[in-house]
Image (cartoon, rainbow, N blue to C red):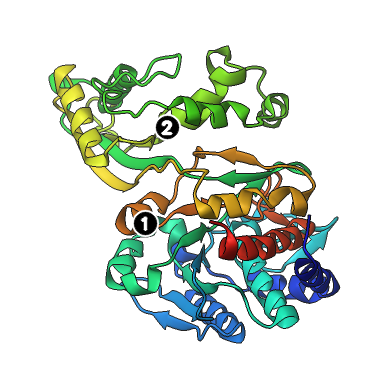
Amino acid sequence: MVNEDAKKVWDYLDEHKDEYIELLKKFCAQPSVSAQNWGMREMAEMVRDTVTELGGNGTLIETDGNPFVYGMIDNGAKRTLTLYNHYDVVPPEPYELWNTPPFEPTIIDGRLYARGSSDNKVSLLSRYIAVDAYQKVLGKLPINIKFLAEGEEEIGSPHLMQFIHDNMDKVQSDGIVWEGGSRVTNGPLIVHMGVKGVTTFSIKCSHPKNGSSPMWRLIWALNSMKNADDYITIDHFNDSIAELTDYEKEFVHKAVYEEEATLKRNGIDHFIRSLTGEALKDKLYSEPSMNIQGLFFDEIDETTGMPKSAEVKIDIRTVPNQNPDEMMQQIRDHLAAHGFDDLEVCGGHSTLPYRGKPDSLLARAVIKNVEAAYGEPPIVLLMTPGSCGMARVVKATGIPIVHYGCMDDSSKAHAPNESADLNHYIRGAKLSVLMFQDFATLE
């Protein structure tokens, strides 16, 4: 049931939908490509000004990279909620694959096409317009709101923890709604409670043993680290992994996973190991995975006809209790034990895994209201296969985090022709309205 106050705010959101869509178009028309330092200051100022218009006294807090946007609406309420988002986007290239210019927002069949539309500007603004509508209709939110937006999420959030440690007073709250979140296209909303971690690294061969090809040395080493059934075979790799409890397995197995649609979308006829049902969900949501990003070599030696050196770039999606530093040592020890002591392992960046609790106050405030906003119950995932800086924030602050938002399976985030469903945009705001109310009152 939607209470009368919420109905009034929902009506306002519907009546002002066009105005809120124009705001989203304005945000998407502003390039903010962190990897290219393109438009970052202008975008940060746009977010700051929007926060100020909401009554949050928006400010830019400088770091060694792009600034954070911070603001707070202090209503003297018992509880405070932080809305964390990012205002940067990935590069739009390759331009030739776009049907419309990436920074000229275009509406087609109810979707807004633009770079950054789904990741993350639609989710950012769905929360901001919920605050706006609530205050304009009812005058005052039942909670305090902190706004936090960073400009480097798409390049690994290199200054997020610097900001957290330097500004703990600005971060402290009773819950954090994290950026992003998704929905099955025209189906249920997905409420994410956590994420897998990611550790990136490279293996280099500059001085191969016995005059071997550097490229073949890397290929042979890779064959020792993962087999054809997709099992990671690095020595002691699985020793520290935290097993799912029966309570956690229940959520994993209840998750709706559209197997046939996923197979079709990816042009394949079966999943790895021919997995299906609960076993497939266990692999997707609770097993680590290892991916080769690229295999490279430099100039060819004219005498041997072989590359002078070679390098492979790898990422591993990690699960709870796997530590990036310990993993790097496991990889070095494994390679040495298997005769690959001529290879050099170079660490990259990492984020930690986090498996959330669906019985936290914030999680309950979100989950109980999804059906009212979307017409069907949510899919609740304890972890998503993707990664972000969520776990480091939880570890540093102890604040529970929930991840929901306005992407969907058709969004093509990070790809050409990225888009956002505009009805989802407004529904996401309506969910936030109900969540604000319950976050204030649930015990």
Q: Is residue 285 visible?
A: yes
Q: In the image shown, does 437 or 25 lie closer to the viewer?
A: 437
Disc 2 marks a residue whose amino acid type is Asn
Query: Which label was assigned to residue 166?
Result: none
Q: In the image shown, does 423 or 434 lie closer to the viewer?
A: 434
In the picture, measured across the screen, residue 17 lies left or right of residue 407, that is right
In the picture, measured across the screen, residue 77 lies left or right of residue 365, that is left
Query: Which label was assigned to residue 393?
Result: 1
Q: Position of residue 33 (x, y in %)?
A: 51, 65
SS class, disc 1: helix
Q: In this view, does 29 lie above or below 434?
A: below
Q: Are marks 1 and 2 in contact (CB under 8 Å)?
A: no
Q: In the image shown, does 339 or 360 lie closer to the viewer?
A: 360
Q: In the image shown, does 146 or 339 lie closer to the viewer?
A: 146
Mark whose residue sits in front, 1 or 2: 1
Which residue was labeled with disc 2?
291
Q: Which residue is drawn at 30% across and 40% down?
A: 201
Residue 238 sits in quarter? top left
Q: Which residue is drawn at 32% across and 52% down?
A: 395
Residue 427 sits in quarter? bottom right
Q: In this view, does 95 lie above or below 242?
A: below
Q: In which quarter of the image is the N terminus?
A: bottom right
Q: How many labels does the image show?
A: 2
Distance (Cα) linking label 1 and label 2? 25 Å
Q: Is residue 414 visible?
A: no
